[in-house]
Image (cartoon, rainbow, N blue to C red):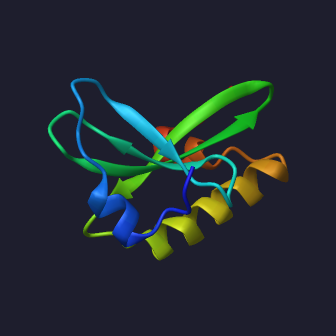
Amino acid sequence: MPRITKRVVDALKPHDRERVVWDDEIKGFGVRVHPTGKRVYIVKYRHRGRVVKTTIGPHGPIAPAEARARATEIITAARTGRDPAAAVVGARP
């Protein structure tokens, strides 16, 4: 998959089903493309043996470089044993 840049994200076309395009440099960082054409940055990581997907934010208000930096922070926090999504969703077991 390509490195996620503004040019790449702007060129993504919607399909009849939701799809995710993953970044080739940061494992777990991607952009979800909805059938409506809406694009949202996401990050996927493991916490306590479970795969957690969390939304970083929409394309447009958030630039790809900002989303990339936030994804790196989230993945780093997950590697240290914290669950970054817990602060957003509430306490997780």
- Residue at 64% across, 56% down: 74
> Residue 32, position in %: x, y?
38, 42
For image coordinates 85% across by 53% down, the residue present is: 80
Give the total number of marks visible in the rendering. 0
Across and down, in percent, residue 18 comes to 32, 29
65 in relation to 73, above or below: below
Left or right for 75, reference 91: right
Q: Could you tell whether 56 is left or right of 15 in the image? A: right
Q: Residue at x 28, y 62 (%)?
A: 10
Q: Which quadrant would residue 36 be assigned to in this image?
A: top left
Quarter of the image where the C terminus is located: top right
Q: Is residue 14 left or right of residue 64?
A: left
Residue 89 percent location from the top left of the image: 48, 39
Q: Residue at x 20, y 33 (%)?
A: 35
Tell which residue pokes out farthest to the left in this image.
36
- Is residue 77 or residue 37 the one in the foreground? 37
- Residue 92 in view in this figure: no
For residue 92, above or below residue 82: above
Q: Which of the pair 67/87 is nearer the observer?
A: 67
- What is the residue that sits farthest to the right in this orientation? 80
Q: Quadrant of residue 58?
A: bottom left
User: Vertical placement of 68 versus 58: above or below?
Assistant: below
Q: Is residue 75 visible?
A: yes
Q: Position of residue 51 (x, y in %)?
A: 67, 28
